[in-house]
Amino acid sequence: MSGRLIAVHVARPRRRRLLTAFNAGFSAGSGTRRRMAGEREGRMSHAHEFHEFQSWLILIEAEYREMPGLHLTERQAQRLWGLDRQTCSELLSTLVSIGVLWETPGHAYTLAGRAA
């Protein structure tokens, strides 16, 4: 078996918050995150990128909830999930803004409500 399936149940209110946070960040977003449908072949459409970003938010939240003591710097999170710097920063910032994660004074990210 080459892949690993992960089932994640997301309550409706949480999902609504994730979508709202993503929409706010995406519309104001950076140049790398703004790709429109119909651009050159090989680029993601807006809808696909939206779904991918949402999937990452859900996956990262699930990882932190599965391992409550998880305490990562942005660089460590980049390596763990194979993300580029910009995308990782946007994901972590979104999760902090909706109250899932907390950024410690040492610039590490941990599950909100947990002491560093």
Image (cartoon, rainbow, N blue to C red):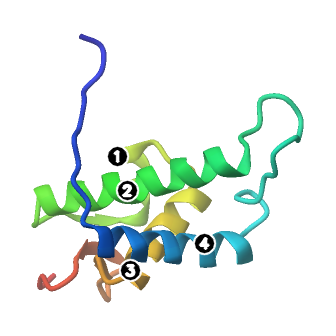
Other residues around mark 2 within 10 Å, as few (<14) / some (14–19) / many (≥20): many
For residue 105, which numbered disc appears in the image?
none
Circle number at residue 96: 3
Which mark is first along the chain, 1 or 3? Answer: 1
Left or right: where 92 falls relative to 36? left
| Mark 3: few/some/many CA within 10 Å (<14, 14-19, 20+) | some
Q: In which quarter of the image is the N terminus?
A: top left
| Towards the viewer: 112 or 116 | 112
Amino acid residing under circle 4: Asn
Q: Which residue is farthest bottom?
A: 105
Q: Distance between the residues labelled 4 and 1?
A: 25 Å
Nearer the viewer's eye, disc 3 or disc 4? 4
Please tell me which of labels 4 and 2 falls first in the chain: 4
Residue 29, position as x, y percentages in the image: 70, 71
Which is closer to the viewer, label 4 or label 2?
4
Q: What residue type is labelled 2?
A: Ala
| Residue receiving disc 4 | 23
Residue 24 in percent (x, y) is at 61, 79
Residue 85 vs residue 15, the one in the foreground: 15
Q: Which of marks 4 and 1 is nearer the N terminus?
A: 4
Query: Compared to 41, does 2 lie above or below?
Result: above
- Please identify the quarter of the rendering in which residue 44 is found: top right
| Mark 2 residue element | helix
The residue pinned by badge 2 equals 77
* Residue ID for mark 1: 80
Q: Which residue lies furthest to the top in this view?
A: 1
Q: Which amino acid does label 1 sit on?
A: Leu
